[in-house]
Image (cartoon, coloured by chain):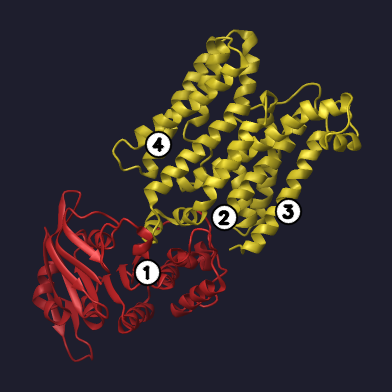
Chain colours: A red, B yellow
Amino acid sequence: MLTASALDVAIGGICVCRKLDLSLGRGEALAILGRNGAGKSTLLATLAGLRPAQGGSAAIAGIALPPRDGRALAMQRGYLAQQQHDAFATEVLEAVLAGRHPHLSRWEWESAADTDIAAQALAEVGLAGFGPRPLHTLSGGERQRVALATLLAQQPALYLLDEPLTHLDLNHQIAALEILARLTRAGAAVAAVLHDPSLALRYFGQALLLFGGGEWLAGPAAEVLTAANLTRLYGHPLRRYDGAGHPVFIPE
Amino acid sequence: MPTPRRALIVLLLLLLLAAASLLTALLAGSYAVAPGVVLDALLGGGNGVGAEVVISLRLPRAVGAFACGGLLALAGALMQVLLRNPLADPYVLGISGGAGVGALAAMLLSLPLVFIHGGAFAGALAAMVLVFGLARGDASWTQARLLLTGVIVAAGCGAAVALILSVAPEHKLHGMLFWLMGDAGQIVTPWPPLTVLAIGLAAALPFAREMNLLARGETLAATLGVAVPRLRGVLYVLASLLTAAAVTSAGSIGFVGLVVPHLMRLLLGNDQRLLLPAAALGGGILLTLADTLARTIVAPQQLPVGVLTALLGVPAFLFLLTRQPRGSA
């Protein structure tokens, strides 16, 4: 679904990753971790085809990045950006219906089926009945869930999410991760930038660590997400605790 | 979100209002013309002074004012999406400033009317090309850079206009001020602005849904497959040409381009598929009515129509704004 080979990504003179090789198939989930400023978002935007790489190549479902036809790519991959500022008032349902854009031809209007998909996406993120609400009357966490619903309404095969858990309460963090797990089981590919290595280990099969300066480490989450690697990643000692059902990493 | 059906009904209602505003403009004036005579004249029949006044004086001016109002409101709606800024109006990027310099220079040199229109159009195009070139300079073409470049060019044009005004002989000042405030009386023929309005609307509507996404955010639009740089280029060129056409015909009439898109947004929501044609019609209606008032309330004296658009638009806008639940504008 998503492949990168010998990918070089840099921003503002800072090297994010050098010669990154990555392959994410259907039914696989990848967590991307790194320190603030390591370039997680930059890498994800590059993998989404939204900014050019400095070297190497990447492709989504056979479409080379950056794409020539943005709409064809938008049928395959969805991208949840970090929170954006709204200049104009919008209704929640209207915002979620934006996800249907690539599915509609130029003169087509959203059909009842599209509205159903959007309403269902809202229900999935626990915002059933929020459709007519003005978007700006929602809290930060609710807006984040509206953004997630917009992504769900897009129904891509590859989901790229930049910090999907920001502003979310614990219960909604787990709910969001459960949605991603369900999508993965249904055959989608998921890659997400996360801050919590414990949740990454619990919900994601693969992990990519960005150490800064272009260095990276990727592989099965169980092998990559070790106390030693994470201690090096965050520059702070971490200890792993087992026995609570799921292993957790605690900063010393 | 409007359905196609609701959009059609709203637009039909606005068309009716537009027809009513044009009829009002044909009926009103210091020379009384009976409604029957107006209808006869419109249908090609009728002669005499009444029919003559309607067909060769009031009709071109009313239709021209309608077209210019539509142009300005449409251009304003496009600019607001392009800059993602509710405060943007057709003049924010210096188009009217450039046109003002061109037109006033022609007036200063006592050139005939056609040169005043030509100068306005050339000045508007020069400002458009200048801002476009400078804003694209580093290929980033960001909203902030575009806005900043436009505002600076507009400020430069404003200084040039002030310079011309200060050196102009006394007897030309009145005409220059009227031009600057906007005056539908200078409309020679309504066809150029009307044609540009029709073409502009037809060119903008295919991009309306993409504009909805751009209004919500550049990244979101790009993510969902919108070719953002191309769309912004289309918006910039369209909005600039529409503004240039309006300013060339009737001077820089203020307020229509800022307030009509907002009025329509408050009434109808922010779906560009409905908003763009509704703003075009709404702008036309507002300017037709304002111009009719401008030439009748203190007849035979005429007021600059820009004053009337503001006097009509401000209370209407404030009324709608206060009627809305807090903070939803």
Q: Which SS class for mark 2?
A: helix
Q: Which amino acid does label 2 sit on?
A: Arg
Find disc 3 in the rendering and name its residue. B13
Q: What residue type is labelled 3?
A: Leu
Q: Which amino acid does label 1 sit on?
A: His
Find residue A165 and report its image quarter.
Answer: bottom left
User: In front here: A208 or A143?
Assistant: A208
Above or below A189: residue B115: above
Find disc 4 in the rendering and name its residue. B148
Find disc 2 in the rendering and name its residue. B273
**Residue under mark 2: which chain is it in?**
B
Distance (Cα) linking label 3 and label 4:
39 Å
Above or below B109: residue B70: below
User: In front here: B216 or B189?
Assistant: B189
User: In front here: A243 or A104?
Assistant: A104
Left or right of A224 in this view: B303: right
**Residue under mark 4: which chain is it in?**
B
Q: Which SS class for mark 4?
A: helix
Number of marks: 4
User: How far from the left and from the top, in percent, is residue B204?
Assistant: 52, 47
